[in-house]
Amino acid sequence: MIPVEYRDRLGIEPGMEVNVLIRGQFLIVELDTDIESDIEFLEGYKGKLGEQAFDMNSVEDIIKDLLEQQFYAGENFIVDRVGNQKMLIRGSDRIIKESIKILSHASRHWLDGNYVETIREFAEALDLDFAILLSTFRRKLDSMAPGGDMSMIEVMGGEVVFSLAVATAVTHFRERVGDIVTERIVKRAEERGYIKALGQDTVENLITQQLAERYSILMNLRTLRELARTSVKSTGERAYSTKVEELLDEFDDKNTPQKVIDRRKRTYRRRLARARDEGREIDRDQLREELGLDAIVVDDEEEELTEDAMPSMPSFDF
């Protein structure tokens, strides 16, 4: 039985499946997301989310505003969420600027219409679960454009949609920081005997609600610390990610099962058919490379399978 506050936090509803994993001394419960479906969903929006209307200067401004809201006042001052407390932490401005630079670098993919890769780099930069972050953003985007209706997105503009993507990542990051802070304070409260006397729920309630202002300054100090870790690791992390992709590309070329190749071919033909129906030109060589078919012969004119005719594919948790 998963407590209701955690179900609400993860959006777990009756009938949904979860994965239960052991990592070190921790038992991890996470949503079982269909990452392939989420990737295909976002790729279907490629070039349609209004990124043509803004540039890297706008990207940096959006990220800066979102990072500074509620916790950073500038000139190395950290504040609580209501502005009653202000603390000078030297080096804060450098950390904020470096973090903006890192997230802006990830956002270069967004301006090319590659939303999935943007979400992936956000997750890597902020130590978040990519599958959960991707699934959350998909749900939010779908609520803005239910059934693929683009009217709301067109009315609000591309910067709003991009802000939603950044805000989703920052919100998950802040939740992770909040969990760290709460866990540490509760542990100290337990050492002082408060848990035994009052109960853990009461102590957590006192920390997060009745001591909200003082709790939020602790959260914001921890946020800065986590951002500092992001800044320091950025160069090595990018090199690491590049090596991972090279290794997987090599593995993929040698070990791709035929059923996966067939599925990629179906996706390729659907994308071509969609482009023809919409009267768009499409770079077939680029599409083959994107789908991992650049070294495989594909008959462009082969009859396309409908969704109903496609075999169902199981989801995998690696």
Image: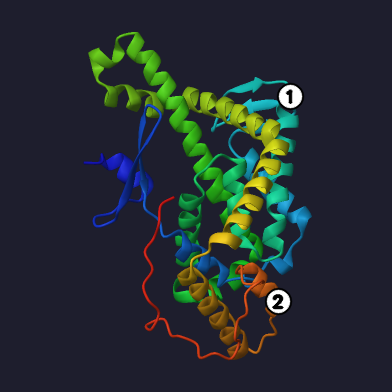
Say how the picture is coloured.
rainbow
Question: Given the image, on which type of amino acid does mark 2 rest?
Answer: Asp
Mark 1 highlights which residue?
Answer: 91
Identify the residue at horizontal 70%, vertical 35% (top origin): 96
User: Quick check: can you spot residue 77?
Assistant: yes
> Is 214 left, or right, of 233 in this rendering?
left
Residue extending furthest toward the left: 1
Residue 126 versus residue 307: which sits nearer the camera?
A: 307
Find out whether the residues at labels 2 and 1 contact each other: C-beta distance under 8 Å: no
Quarter where residue 155 is shown? bottom right
Residue 99: x and y, percent?
69, 38
Residue 286 versus residue 247: which sits nearer the camera?
A: 247
Above or below residue 225? Residue 38 is below
Q: CA distance from mark 2 to mark 1?
A: 47 Å
User: Callout 1: few (<14), some (14-19), or many (20+) C-alpha neighbours within 10 Å?
Assistant: few
Residue 49: x and y, percent?
62, 68
Residue 230 versus residue 201: which sits nearer the camera?
A: 230
Mark 1 falls on what kind of element? loop
The image's mark for residue 285 is 2
Residue 154: x and y, percent?
60, 73
User: Callout 2: few (<14), some (14-19), or many (20+) C-alpha neighbours within 10 Å?
Assistant: few
